Image (tube, rainbow, N blue to C red):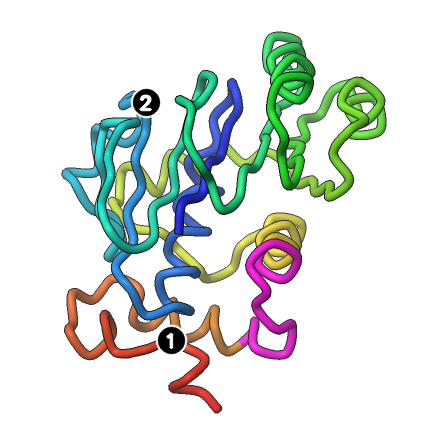
Amino acid sequence: MRIGIVGSCDKHDLVLMLAVLLRAYRGIPAAVAADDGRAYGYLDGEASGVSIHLSPEYEPEGLVVWDYSSYPPSGTFDKLILVTSCERASVEFAEQAAKELEFDALVVVEAPCSITPKYIYRRVPTIAQRYEYEDNPGRRIDWIYNGQVSLKRQQPDFVETVNGLLIDLFHVPKKDLKKLWQYAAKRGWEHDSSVLGTGTWASRHV
């Protein structure tokens, strides 16, 4: 599966969280590839069982989530997600990108300012699936320093956005979400052959 997450803003917390949860759900190796190593370069090639590659042209088998800070190269994505912060440059990038590419969802990273998601939705009106959460720099900083994705005690709106994407774009049943988070929290960082390559999470939790 090829997933592109595009936006001129810090979003590695969203990218890593989706990669960890989809890896746990599908039971296959997962990777994150990025065109900007500012954050990912500190992760030593791996975070919570997800391999990290500082190459936007990385082409492995399995599940790959690309983090693009600029326009993605031409190619076929199973899902393409646009992310914007409230900063003017980020909103203008999103506005232009939405005119040139077809996205499956728009995510707004809110900040304590006068720029609201409603305003951004007026600037980027063509994407029907919309999600939003409050920016949390501490989360992004901690994950890079610790080299791990924490699934515990996350802010409710961030969890709601991640769950919304899992349900709407990746068809994870709503009833499975709580157990999926618990499972990924316990086993997401283990390099264990019993976790990878043995069928989907759903097949082990019926």
Who's the residue at 34% across and 46% down the image? 64
**Callout 2: SS:** loop
**Which numbered disc flags the more N-terminal residue, 1 or 2?**
2
Query: Residue 115's x, y, as percent?
Result: 78, 19
Verify whether residue 193 appears in magenta: no
**Residue at label 2?**
35
Mark 2, other Cα within 10 Å: few <14 / some 14–19 / many ≥20: some
Residue 18 is at least partly visible in this image? yes
Query: Residue 156's x, y, as percent?
Result: 65, 55
**Quadrant location of residue 20?**
bottom left
Who's the residue at 39% across and 55% down the image? 150
- Kind of residue at badge 2: Asp
**Callout 1: SS:** loop
Q: Is residue 101 above or below residue 66?
A: above
Q: Is residue 46 above or below residue 93?
A: below
Who's the residue at 24% across and 27% down the image? 55
- Kind of residue at badge 1: Thr
Query: Residue 200's x, y, as percent?
Result: 38, 75
Q: Is residue 21 above or below residue 139?
A: below
Is 161 on the left-hand or right-hand side of 148?
Answer: right
Q: Is residue 90 above or below residue 4?
A: above
The secondary structure that dominates the magenta segment is helix
Magenta region: which residues? 166-178
**Residue at label 1?**
200
